[in-house]
Image: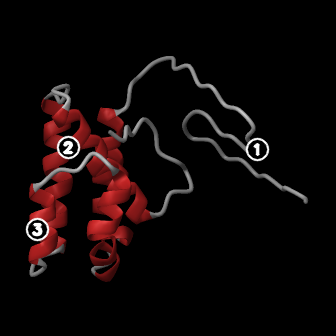
């Protein structure tokens, strides 16, 4: 099972939406979804249903929650881009809200090995230059 534990600042709109849908689906599948998660998931999926009207494959995908963001991108990414849902601030705000209520709060332990330019935390601005 793919676990979504954070989102990247440089994530595209489609990746953000997919991560949020996956996080909501995972919370629901593991039984940890409270009212806030359910409401946030319903808000995001409701906005997407409106944006994606007339695309039955996408409507069906929204009925079958998938806890893997890569599968969401594969299943509905092209449709999200076609209707510009990835540029709709209401949709993006709903995705951020869903991620916000599905993420663990408080202190977290992070293990990073053999990496460059790692960013941990929220609301970071970083500039990296890698040469060679």
Q: Disc 1 marks which residue?
A: 116
User: What whole-number distance in Å separates the C-alpha atoms at marks 1 and 2?
Assistant: 34 Å
Q: Is residue 19 left or right of residue 59?
A: right
The residue lying at 17 percent from left, 50 percent from top is 65
**Can you say whether 110 is above or below 3 in the image?**
above
Residue 98: where, in percent of width, then height?
Answer: 28, 43
Q: Front-most of 110 and 87? A: 110
**Residue 17 shows in the view:** no
Circle 3/circle 2 CB separation < 8 Å:
no
**Image coords of residue 17 (percent x, y):** 33, 57
Mark 2: few/some/many CA within 10 Å (<14, 14-19, 20+): many
Query: Which residue corresponds to mark 2?
Result: 40
Q: Is residue 16 shown left or right of residue 82?
A: right
Q: Is residue 49 above or below residue 102?
A: below
Circle nearer the viewer, 1 or 2: 1
- Residue with the mark numbered 3: 59
In the rendered structure, the answer to whether residue 57 lies left or right of residue 27 reads left
How far from the left and from the top, in percent, is residue 100? 35, 37
Label 3 to label 2: alpha-carbon separation: 18 Å
Classify mark 1: helix, strand or loop: loop
In the rendered image, which quarter is residue 31 located in? top left
**Quadrant assignment, res 109:** top right
């Amino acid at each position: 099972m793919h676990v979504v534990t954070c989102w990247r600042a440089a994530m595209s709109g489609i990746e953000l939406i997919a991560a949020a849908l996956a996080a909501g689906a995972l919370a629901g599948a593991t039984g940890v979804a409270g009212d806030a998660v359910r409401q946030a998931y319903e808000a995001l999926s409701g906005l997407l249903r409106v944006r994606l009207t007339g695309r039955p494959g996408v409507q069906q995908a929204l009925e079958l929650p998938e806890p893997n963001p890569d599968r969401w991108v594969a299943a509905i990414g092209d449709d999200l881009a076609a209707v510009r849902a990835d540029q709709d601030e209401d949709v993006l705000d709903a995705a951020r809200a869903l991620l916000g209520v599905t993420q663990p709060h408080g202190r977290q332990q992070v293990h990073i090995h053999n990496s460059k330019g790692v960013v941990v935390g929220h609301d970071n601005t970083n500039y990296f230059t890698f040469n060679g």
